[in-house]
Amino acid sequence: GIDAAVKYLHNIGIDLNGYILMGEHGVTGRVLTRKHFVTKDEGIEYLNIIASEYRDFANKSRRVRLFLKNSPNTSRVIYVVRTEIDPDWHTFIQYIFPDAKIIHIIIDDGAATYEDPSKSALQYLRLNGEKGIGRLVQYPYLRLKLWYRVFCLKMWKRKYERNGEYICGAIYNKNVNKNGKIEFQKNEPFSKLYSEVFMESPLVISEEFINMFESTILVNTQCLKENNLTDGKVDYKVLQDFLRCVEDSNTKVIIKPHPREQNRQKYEGSGCGVVYERVSQEVSLARLKQKPKCIVSFYSSLLLNAYGLFNVPAISLARMLMKEDISQALRIELDEYYRNYKSVIYFPENYNELKELLKRILR
């Protein structure tokens, strides 16, 4: 997303001169460096701010303030590239540079990019029930965060849009019409820029490996059992039923298990090719001359990218999984995913509908 934003700014004639500040990933602890980026702009410095080295926000903010004050950016137009609007950063930078024009570029972060912040906050309570309410009582900052997401983010976004301080840098534009229907359209030129970034990625992936996916049905599994959302059997049953629907299609099926699945070997008895390598599938898809016939999963972000970046049909088995005995938390997530993305992803309701859909896609 950062690479796509930098490419966009270059394409409209803006020479960048400043810093890209990076922190460690909140879950994996992974830290990016310059080598992970496609853009090698001489005017950009890539600097890491590691949370474990700066144990409180005050220390971290002092370091950021030092970077910004030493920035050679004399034009005082500052681009804040993030995965969601953050008024705190706006206020923080404006405090250092009172005369600066600050423009927010919101880049793609998968399905989370398109969630209504107020709905996602309230969904926290629906998913966690009494436990969630108990945490809100125990931790005041969570109450503030919930209130902030429900009431403030939309207001700030509208303000930045009015002031010309907001650029949507996601793969899609999401619109809600008067009847409440959600529609997605590719966000040009950003969707093309993301495709270019994946094509130019410095990741080394063998051509032999990439060619495994040519003209296949690519199935992405998910770690639902590991996330305590299913018992691991119901989602596997739905997948087996799907495979029976395609066994007469004369199309090769490749299964790509999620890296965090603990029992990935169970797919080896499916009669399909199984790929375990941990590589960026978007990079592999970008380099493929013959794209997969379709990509299948439950509610992966790859389904959104399949159509948005590569025009590959995406099929979610979410509606069929919802007919099984699953947790209420997963049922809520799947239903929300369906209502959000049914304009760009196929959601067959049953196996007859799935068979008809596959006939149209594979013919």
Image (cartoon, rainbow, N blue to C red):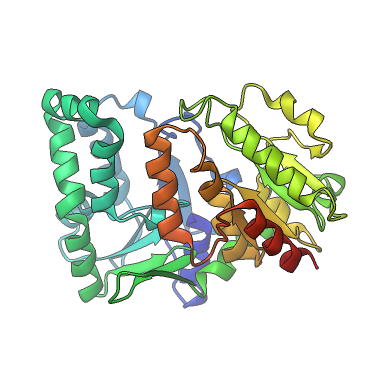
Q: Quick one: quadrant of the C terminus? A: bottom right
> In which quarter of the view is residue 164 placed?
bottom left
Q: Is 154 or 166 nearer to us in this picture?
A: 154
**In the picture shown, does residue 256 fall above or below 351?**
above
The quarter of the displayed image where residue 49 is located:
top left
As rendered, which of 238 and 314 lies closer to the eye?
Answer: 238
Residue at 41% x, 59% y is 340
Q: Position of residue 319 (x, y in %)?
A: 51, 50
Q: Residue at x 39, y 58 (%)?
A: 114
Is residue 5 found left or right of 312 in the rendered image?
left
In this view of the protein, which residue sits in the foreground, 193 or 78? Answer: 193
The residue lying at 37 percent from left, 35 percent from top is: 328
Where does the image place residue 177, in percent across and percent down from the top left?
32, 75
Give the farthest residue toward the front. 352
Q: Residue 291: give x, y in percent of width and height.
A: 76, 61
For the point 73% across and 68% down, which residue is it?
360
Q: Position of residue 96 (x, y in %)?
A: 18, 53
